[in-house]
Image (cartoon, grey):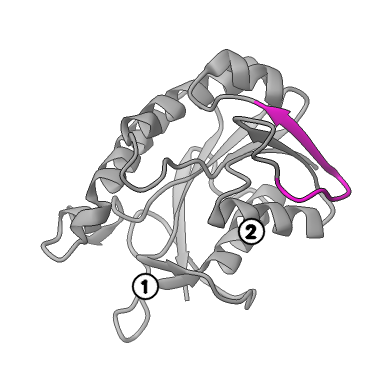
Amino acid sequence: MKIALVGSTGRIGRRILTEALTRGHHVTAIVRASSHKPDSRADLELKTGDVTNAESIVASAKGNVVLISAYGPARGGDYDEIVTAAGALVEAVGQNQPMRLIWVGGAGSLEVTPGVQLVDTSDFPPAYKKAALAHRDALGVFRKAPIDWTYVSPAAEIFEGTRTGKYRIGGDQLVVNEKGESRISMEDFAKAIIDEVEKPQFFRKRFTMAY
């Protein structure tokens, strides 16, 4: 399958790239500058594009059937760009039909109890709150979008680890284990995303996963 990927040089994006290539997909990595190049590998193509500019993404993603965004500004950056990027990608995918959009979002907008989201709890880390609220606003953009989109939220804790190949899927509610923990490795998070690419289940929906 031909996949366009934004954010391929980030911690999660690198793992999505590896998972997709390992499973035999052709990936077009869309980077802002040619110096931000992921490793050279077979079935990997590099194109430049600006995730906040729809016309730029229309050109760089053309010919692919899925566009995955693992975009995120650096911590402390301009979090308003998250919502801008969501709108730009919706527009770009709309012009590049048939194409599906998969967005790597945050866990903050997952419900911990009915009507209460993780980001609104008293112990949510302040350092992550602006990003979480921006990703929540991005989810609102997608829910009004006339394209095929999927929003993927990680567990409350996502970490560099190993690929176990096992996880439990949820929808809009935080997935926790018997100890009340919500955890997933970046490697298994990437697997879940490519699983969704290959066997779509969540059209115009959000899903999450955890151990």
> In screen coordinates, is 102 left or right of 117?
right
N-terminal label among 1 and 2:
2
Kindly tell me whether residue 66 is visible in this rendering. Answer: yes
Frontmost residue, 47 versus 194: 47
Label 2 sits on residue: 15
Q: Which mark is residue 98?
A: none
Q: Which residue is the extreme one toward the left?
A: 122
Q: Name the residue located 24 percent from the left edge and 55 percent from the top edge.
A: 127
Which element is circle 2 on? helix
User: Which residue shows up at 29% across the image and 80% down it?
Assistant: 180
| In this rendering, position of residue 98 left or right of residue 148 | right
Q: Rounded to the nearest whole Å, what is the CA distance between mark 1 and mark 2?
A: 20 Å
State the extent of the magenta-drawn residues as a range. Answer: 38-48
Number of residues whose C-alpha sits closer than 10 Å to that of mark 2, classed few (under 14), some (14–19) or many (20 or more): many
* Quadrant holding the N terminus: top right
Residue type for callout 2: Arg
Q: Tell me if residue 203 comes above or below residue 196 in the rendering.
A: above
Which one is nearer the viewer's eye here, 36 or 180? 36
Q: Position of residue 18 (x, y in %)?
A: 72, 57
Q: Residue furthest front?
A: 35
> Is 151 placed left or right of 195 in the picture?
left
| Coordinates of residue 44 in the picture (x, y in percent) | 81, 43
Query: Is residue 143 among what the camera can see?
Result: no
The type of residue carrying mark 1 is: Ser
Q: Is residue 125 magenta?
A: no
* Position in image of residue 90 (x %, y %): 51, 24
Q: Quadrant of residue 22?
A: bottom right
Percent from the top left, x then y, of residue 117? 22, 54
Q: Secondary structure at mark 1?
A: loop
Can you identify the residue that label 1 sits on?
182
